[in-house]
Amino acid sequence: MTTFNAAVVGTGFIGPVHVEGLRRAGVHVAGILGSSLEKSQAAAERLGIPRGYRDLTELLGDDTVDAVHLTTPNRHHFAEVQAVLAAGKHVLCEKPLAMTSAESARLAELAAASDRVCGVNYNIRFYPLCMEARERIRRGDLGEVFHVSGAYVQDWLLYPTDFNWRVLADDGGELRAVADIGTHWLDLIQYMVDQPIIAVCADLRTVYPTRQRPVGSVQTFTGEAPVDTYPVEITTDDYGAILLEFASGTRGVMHVSQVTAGRKNCLRWEIAGAKSAMAWESERPNDLWIGHRSSANEVLIRDPSLMSPAVRPYSDYPGGHNEGFPDTFKQLFRAFYGYIAAGDRTTPPSFPTFADGHRELLLCEAVLRSHRERRWVTI
């Protein structure tokens, strides 16, 4: 098997998740880059990585690095992706791919013109039972898909004293809850039903127009209470509800919230078809509910021996040995580096591409326009 070297840009919450996933996927992590040399070196020592880079120029000058993982704040993605591709390295970028669809369109063009492999980290696709649901829909087990519903809800921004760079439009973009977690749901549903969303009708709400920003910095999801704060204006969404129309005429509805007490990281969906229905949620990721009209309902416990042949390679452990969030990164990275190793760029990738990332930006902009103009908007 070909051994690749990767470098990770970003030392916050998601950067170390990439480091762990890369190692489990058999990829060597050659170095890591933080927002300063001190942060780079501290992260390298903490994570057992050989090198902490001074800056992106030094990283891109490392000839041993085959691919770069970008886990930085959203506002950096556009320039960083361009720099990585100009250096001739493969790139896997955290979502969203860019701040605007104009930026993401340019990155998709650069990716298409390059011989490098480019992906976006919509890792939720790689929960085995979501992949199983996709296979069952494709082979007609549900029949015609009538409608889909679901949500992605969290509570880490429940209080006005909760703060992170993502709440600022200049750092994360004009949309926050929809762009940060809602796009995971939107990408997953389109992947499973194998058809694009073509129109949206959205209603958004900023629960806290003012939040208390810490004088220093706090790490995402730590629950740390800052001592010294000052008020800042917030314009990004804490909550959103979106009606959906798919290309085939299938209808859908989803809501997203980062202010739902007790929901730590809960993505859930339900898909209703002419023959049966299915439902799943990320906080119980090893159970797939299958609903019937004229016979008993079922719960499929994730077990490779009971799943579709095409899905079995993405589920490593026997039934009853649970797989969850970290495993989705491992499986996405296996698909990404396996595609690089195969060398055949004419075959469709099994991981989310820059084209997928661009479409999510178009969706986000349609959602924001729909909310502001109080009407349906076509993508």
Image (spheres, rainbow, N blue to C red):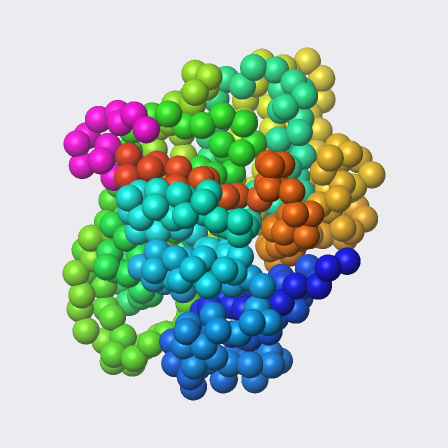
Image mark count: 0
Q: Position of residue 123 (x, y in %)?
A: 55, 49
Q: For residue 207, say whether it is visible.
A: no
Instruction: Report which quarter residue 303 is drawn in.
Output: top right
Is 136 covered by the magenta stretch? Answer: no
Measuring 46% from the left and 40% from the top, which residue is drawn there?
356
Position of 253 with respect to 280 (left or right) is: left
Is 375 covered by the magenta stretch? Answer: yes
Position of 128 with respect to 113 (left or right) is: right
Q: Nearer the viewer, residue 303 or 367?
A: 367
Measuring 43% from the left and 81% from the top, which residue is drawn there?
54
Q: Nearer the viewer, residue 148 or 9?
A: 9
Q: Quadrant of the N terminus?
A: bottom right
Q: Position of residue 159 (x, y in %)?
A: 31, 61
Q: Position of residue 151 (x, y in %)?
A: 44, 39
Q: Position of residue 333 (x, y in %)?
A: 62, 54
Instruction: Report which quarter residue 271 is drawn in.
Output: top right
Measuring 73% from the left and 42% from the top, which residue is drawn there?
302
Measuring 45% from the left and 45% from the top, which residue is drawn there?
113
Q: Nearer the viewer, residue 151 or 340?
A: 340
Residue stretch in magenta: 367-379
Q: For residue 302, say whether it is visible.
A: yes
Q: Is residue 59 above or below residue 358?
A: below
Q: Is residue 221 above or below residue 100?
A: below
Q: Quadrant of the C terminus?
A: top left
